[in-house]
Image (tube, grey):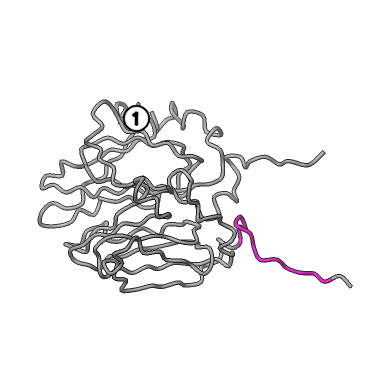
Amino acid sequence: MAVYNIKSPGLGSVGSYQVSGKPFLSGGIDVSAHTTGPLEISFPSVTRWIIFTNHDTSNDFNVAFSSNGFDTNNFFTVSSDTNDRANMMTQRMELKVSRLYITGAATQVDLIAGLTGIDTLEIKDNWSGSSGVG
Amino acid sequence: MPYNPGPPGLGHAGSYQVSGKPFVSGNIDLSAYTSGPLEISFPSVTRWIIVRNRGNSTDNSKIIQVAGSANGFTTGEYFRISDDYNGTGARRNSTTPRMELKMTKIYLTGSSDKVDVIAGLTGIPTTTIRDNWSGSAGIG
């Protein structure tokens, strides 16, 4: 007897991005403690969106989507939480990624993400090698 | 003969409903571009764009301008982003919201030494937008 087997959604599954995300929180990250290279954060499934907040009052941090991105200027910087700067928090960035990388001296970094149910294997090498990723 | 649907077109709704593929160009020193606006080309049509100005000055002299064509700076079809900090307090206009715009290029001018461009990309080829809308009202 044939068995109907529902596969997991693919990367282009629109409905996976229309529903709200499953929460992924990582708070109080001390980026300065990672002295041997960028801190890699891996998500359990493909993201629907990402927000960063910097609570360090004197140190910035940098975010890229591949470790190469820091060498190719494919990264952005989140300012320190000094004098209520607008750039100490990112917008809700609607990006589908499976990993990200952080460098800098900030000691109080919070990451909030909304996850889809899409398997991370759907994105090869987290877009590394693409233009704008590095 | 196999059915080949080809890449999605500019009006393909599903391409804008899924989250974007990341594109980041960071730590841009606009003051180094003295011969004209800096052109940033995207590898595919954008779903959204954020531009952030992290320059500091007491008099907002590191304000930047953003346009959809190089002509836009001479026709007034651009917008500005203040620098991040004036020495005593923050300026709230130092980052844009997530602008849901379909574009293939943006142009930047100004004297800020710290600018980040973050975008979410669709899989739609850039050839579907002729000249990045240049010549249209509101673009220049």
On screen, residue B54 versus residue B41, left or right, reads left
Query: Label 1 lies in what chain?
Result: B
- Amino acid at pointer 1: Gly
**Front residue (pair A84, B5):** B5
Does B94 appear above or below A10? above
Splitting the image into 4 quarters, where does residue B128 fall?
Answer: top right
Disc 1 element: helix
Task: Please provide percent x and percent y for residue A29.
Answer: 32, 71
Q: Residue furthest right?
A: A1
Task: Please provide percent x and percent y for residue B124.
Answer: 56, 41
On screen, residue B107 versus residue B128, left or right, reads left
Mainly helix, strand or loop, the magenta region? loop
Per the image, the residue denoted by label 1 is B72
**Front residue (pair A128, B131):** A128
- Please report the residue visible at 15 percent of the width from the left and 41 percent of the height from the top: B61
**Front residue (pair B93, A102):** A102
Task: Please provide percent x and percent y for residue B81.
Answer: 26, 45
- Please report the residue visible at 48 percent of the width from the left and 46 percent of the height from the top: A130
